[in-house]
Image (cartoon, rainbow, N blue to C red):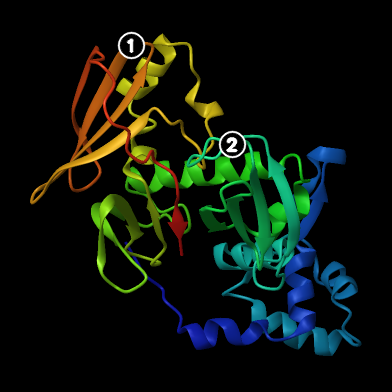
Amino acid sequence: MTDDSVDPGEAFRPLGNEVRTRVLTALLEPVGEGEGRGVAPTTKTFSELFEASGAETTAGFAYHLRQLTDHYLRETDGGYTFTYAGLQIARAIVSGAYTESVDREPVTIPDPCPFCGEVGLRAAVADNTVSVSCHDCGRDVLALPFPPGGHRTHDDESLPAAFDRLYRHRVALLAGGTCPECGGRATSRVEYAERGDGALDPHPPRLHLACGACGYTLRCPVTLAVFDHPAVVAFYHDHGVDLRERPIWNVGREWREAVLSDDPWCVRVSTELEGETLELLVGRDGTVVETARHSSPTSEPATDSAAPSTAR
C-alpha cells in the first residue's frame, strides 16, 4: 500500500476561490428526470470548463485550473476529470454539507412514544440536527444530525423514514466494524453513559461505536446493534413481524436490557412476543455470544425499553 499524503493546508488552499469551486461542480452533470434526477461525474474540455467557470480570460482560467490539477482534477485525452478527492469535495459542495444550516418546523411522527406510549411524537430540525420528542409527556427521545441534502430532497412525509433508514444503516455498519463516514475500521464497546454532572449513569448502558480513522462516534442502546442478528430476524419473522417497520425512536416496548455483569461486560437483551421470549447475551464489544428461545414465564416487572440514541 502506498500513501501519497498532502498537507491539509496545501490540500484546501486551492478551494478558496469561486472560479475553482465552479469548475468542480461543473464536472457533476445532471442526470435523470423527476424523482430520479441526480448528478454524475463527467469529463469536460478546457473550453467547456472555462464557459462554466465565470472566469474573464482564458489565461486567468488556466491559472485556476492548474491549481486544481493533480490533487482534485487530472487531465486525460478527453479533457479534465475528477480524482477521488475532487469528487468528494464536489459532492460536498452541491450537497450543502459545509454551506447550509437547515431549520425546519416540527413534523408529526405517527408512532407511539417509547416512554408514555401516546402517539405524540414530533421531529423538529435545528442546524441540520433532527430532534424527536414527545408532545404528550415532554420527554426527548433522540437528537441526531441529518445532512442538508436530505432535508432538501425529502418532504415532511418522507423525512422521518429517511432519517430512520440512515441511522439503522449506520449502526449496522459500525457494529460490523466499518465506518459509514470514511470506511475506516470501527470498534464497539459497551459502557455506562455519563450524566450531566459527569458521573456515570448505571442504567442503562450504551453501545459506544467509534471509527479510529476519522473519529466518527455513535452511541445507541445495545438493542439496536442486535436487530440484524439471525436469531432476532428469525424470531420476529416467526411471529409475523417485520422489524424494518420499527423505527429507531421506538423499536417496541417488548424489548428489555439488563446488565448481568460489568466486569467482564455481559448485557442480556430480551424480547417477548405471543408468550415466547428470545434472550441474547451481549459481550463487551457488542457481539452476541449466546441466544436462547423459550416460553415466557409470568410477566416480570417492566424496565425502560430501548429508546434514545446520540451521535457526534
Residue 218 or residue 38, whichever sits in front: 218
What residue is rendered at 39% in x and 41% in y?
Answer: 306
**Toward which corner of the image does residue 164 lie, by quadrant?**
top right
In the image: residue 185, left or right of residue 63: left
Residue 128 x/y as whole percent: 65, 63
Q: Secondary structure at mark 2?
A: loop
Name the residue type under label 2.
Answer: Glu
Q: Which one is in front in this view, the residue at disc 2 or the one at disc 1?
A: 2
Q: Image height check: is 200 above or below 224?
A: below
- Any part of residue 140 in sight: yes
What residue is rendered at 67% in x and 35% in y?
Answer: 110
Residue 163 or residue 79, whichever sits in front: 163
In the image: residue 46, left or right of residue 110: right
**Toward which corner of the image does residue 64 lie, by quadrant?**
bottom right
Q: Image height check: is 72 above or below 283?
A: below
Q: Image height check: is 231 above or below 38?
A: above
The residue that label 2 is drawn on is: 118
What residue is rendered at 58% in x and 75% in y?
Answer: 70
**Which quadrant would the N terminus be assigned to in this image?**
bottom left
In the image: residue 182, left or right of residue 271: right
Q: Image height check: is 151 above or below 257?
A: below
**Toward which corner of the image does residue 245 lie, by quadrant?**
top right
Name the residue type under label 1.
Answer: Gly
The residue that label 1 is drawn on is: 275
Mark 2–mark 1 distance (CA, rounded to whole Å): 24 Å
What residue is rendered at 72% in x and 65% in y?
Answer: 102
- Any part of residue 185 in sight: no
